[in-house]
Amino acid sequence: MISEYWDAVAVGSQEYLFIFFTCQKKRPIKIPLPASNQTLIDADNTCVQWGLSEHALFQPVVMVSRGSVMYIINVVLLGASGFSRGHGGAITSISVHPTTPNLFCTTSRDNTTRVYDLVLEVLQPTETPNGKRIRTSKTKIYNAHWPPSTKPSFAGAAHGLRLVRHEAEGSGIGRCIVVLMGGRSGGHHAAVLGAAFHPIFPILATCGMDRCVKIWPIRPVNPFDIKTEDKPLFSSSRIHKASVLSVNWYNCLLLMYTGINAWMVRLADDILLTHSAPAHMRRYPNDSNDRETYLEPGELILWRWLGVDRFFPPKWEDLKASDLLFRGCSSDYQESSSFKLVAIHAFPSVETQYITPKLSVFKSPTHDPIILFTYPNSTSFDMINVCHLSPKRVPPFPLDLETPETPERQTTPTPSSTRAAAPEGVHTDVEDEREVLDELDGTPPVQVINKTPVINGREEVPPPGLEGWTIDIRDHDNGFKVWDDNKKLMNVAMGVDGQFIVGVGSGGSLWVWRPMP
C-alpha cells in the first residue's frame, strides 16, 4: 500500500475527487461523488483527508465533505465505502488522529464537532447490532432516556443522539461515536472552524468563530451509544481577538542517535499553535461616543496549556478510567486562565477582515514543525520554521504610564482620581509610587491614561511580523513557468517527509514543488 500511494495527493471539488501522483508516472484517478441536492454557497469549502481502517490496511480511504454530508471514498475500489449525515450545517474541516488513522472528526457551522470510527459501520434503522433483521417499528434505538420519560429519546442528531427508526445516519463504514455539543455549559456558541487530535492523550482541541479555543476529552462509552460532551477541560476566548481559524498541537518529536541505537523523545505535549482572522478594534475603547475602529492583522500564537498535568498525571495510562479526572470546574470550561503565551506574530495587513490566511503545519520526527500559509487568490506562499518564532516581548513597566495627553482627546478618570480624597498631609500608596517613579525617571509627572486591560499588556507591545521564506509561483528562475497568469493560489500543504509541497488554486490548477533530480 505504501509503495502504491506514497506520493498520492487527494484534491476535492464539489463533484469529483482527484488522486494525483507527484512522482510516479501514473494517470490521475478521477472518482465522481454521489449525487446530492444540497444547495452550496461560496463559503462552503470541500474538505479532504486521508484515513485508514485496521480492517482494510491495503485500502486507504479519503474522507470528502460536501455541504453537511461526509463521504468515505475507497481509493482502491474507486467508489464510496460509506457516507454519513448528522451535522445541521456545512462541514468546515476534517481532522484525522495522527497515530490512530481510523479515528477522525468533522467540525461544522452547527457549533458541534463529531468524532467517527472507520472500524465501525453505521447503524441501520432496520437492523440490530448483531445483524438480525426485524421490523422497522421495533428497531432498538440506543439513546438515553430523558426524564420523566422511560423510553429512549428521539430528539435526533442535533442533541447528539441516534436518529429515529425510519431515518438513517448514513451507510457503510464510519460510525459516529462522540459529539462535542455546542452551547450548553461550555460548548462553542458559533461555527467550529478547526480541530486537532492529541497524539498521546485522549483529548481533542477545537476552535471557532466565537474566538474560543477548547480542549475536550474523548471517551466513548461503547460502540452503540453516542457519547455527548458539553463541558471541555479547557476553554478560553482571551487568546485571540477574532475568529480562531485553526488549531494544531506542537508535539515536537526528537529522533536521537547513539551509535547504532536510535530512539524518539517527545517534547512539549502541552503546546498549541493557533491562528486568527483580522480583528476590528476600537481606537478609543473608553469613549462611548467615539466608535472609530481600525483593522488589526490576524495573529499566529504559540501558547502552552497549563492544565495538562492536572488531568493526566504521571503514569496515567495505568489508572482506571474511573480514576481519571475528566471533568474540570466552571473556571475550566467557561473562561479558563490556565494558559501561557509563548510567541505572538502578526500576519501581513489586509484590506478587510474577510481576507483570512490559509495555514497548514507539517510535522516530522526528523525536522522542526514547518508552517505554510497563503492568502486566497494570491501568487505566493510563505514557509516558516516554528523554532524561528521569537518569544513574546515583555511589556514595559509600569503599564499605565503614558506620554502626556494631547488636548484633542479627553480621557476617562483614572482609578487614582476616582478614589476618595485622602486627609490633608496623608499620602496614598498610589501617590507615593508615582512620586518615586517620577524621581527615578527625572521627568515631570505625566497624566495617566486609563487603558482597556488586555492580556499582559499586549496592546502596548505590537507583535512582530512573520519572517520566513516566500515562494512566488511566478518565479521563472527556478525552472517553473505559469502558463496562465489568471491562476491564483488558494491553499498549500507539505507532505512525504517534507519532500513535496502541493498547492491548489483557481480554475482547477495544481502546483507541485519537489527536489530537483
Image (cartoon, rainbow, N blue to C red):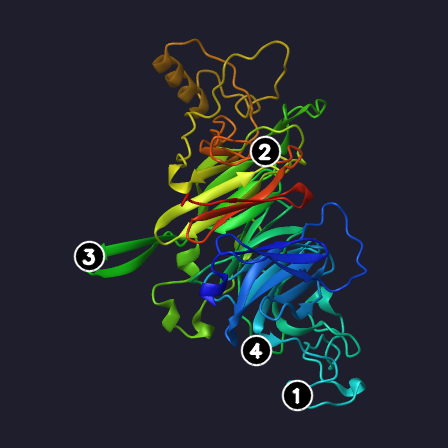
Q: Residue at x 46, y 46 (%)?
A: 339
Q: Amino acid at mark 4?
A: Asn
In the image, residue 264 above or below residue 60: above
Q: Is residue 420 left or right of residue 272?
A: right
In the image, residue 286 above or below residue 115: above
Q: Amino acid at mark 3?
A: Thr
Query: What residue did someone put label 4 on?
Result: 222
Q: Position of residue 185 (x, y in %)?
A: 63, 58
Query: What residue did someone put label 2 on?
Result: 379
Tag 1–tag 3 contact (CB < 8 Å): no
Q: Residue at x 58, y 10 (%)?
A: 406
Q: Residue at x 50, y 21 (%)?
A: 422
Q: Helix, strand or loop at disc 1? A: loop
Tag 1–tag 2 contact (CB < 8 Å): no
Tag 4–tag 2 contact (CB < 8 Å): no
Query: What residue did someone put label 3 on?
Result: 258
